[in-house]
């Protein structure tokens, strides 16, 4: 052996991030066993934020839900899911 192979944590995280991004954007991942589209937006600091695309309204959403009765997948608004105990906190987090 000439040289030990090594991986630094920085390289590892970099590689993992690339893989995660690839997986996210390839739509091979599914949510609740249903393919869901993903999108990104840039943050003010040059970073990238990943989002679900709600299959109903096509809006960027950080959270998707599976309706317990209709089995429909969508954002809170589309599925008409209301907050009960966390209404105000949730309203701020919605977008
Ligand atoms: Zn929606």
Image (tube, grey):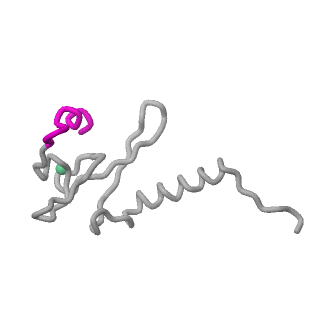
Magenta range is 83-95
Furthest residue in direction front, as rendered: 85
Q: Residue 38, percent across and down?
A: 34, 54
Q: Is residue 76 above or below residue 88?
A: below
Camera-side residue of 40 and 29:
29
Q: Residue at x 41, y 43 (%)?
A: 49
Q: Residue at x 18, y 32 (%)?
A: 88
Camera-side residue of 33 and 84:
84
Q: Residue at x 12, y 44 (%)?
A: 82
Quarter where residue 73 is shown: bottom left
Q: Residue 45, percent across and down?
A: 47, 31
Quadrant into which the C terminus falls: top left
Quadrant into which the N terminus falls: bottom right
Q: Residue 89, percent across and down?
A: 23, 34
Quarter where residue 16 is shown: bottom right
**Direction from residue 1 to residue 46 in the image, left or right:** left
Report if residue 33 lies within the magenta region. no
Q: Residue at x 41, y 62 (%)?
A: 26
Q: How many marks?
A: 0
**Direction from residue 12 to residue 26 in the image, left or right:** left
């Amino acid at each position: 052996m000439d040289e030990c192979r090594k991986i630094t944590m920085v390289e590892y995280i970099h590689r993992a991030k690339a893989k995660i991004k690839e997986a996210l954007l390839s739509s091979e991942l599914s949510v609740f066993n249903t393919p869901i589209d993903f999108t990104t937006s840039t943050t003010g600091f040059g970073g990238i934020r990943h989002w679900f695309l709600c299959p109903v309204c096509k809006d960027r959403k950080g959270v998707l839900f599976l309706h317990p009765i209709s089995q429909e997948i969508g954002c809170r608004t589309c599925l008409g899911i209301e907050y009960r105990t966390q209404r105000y906190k949730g309203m701020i987090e919605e977008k």
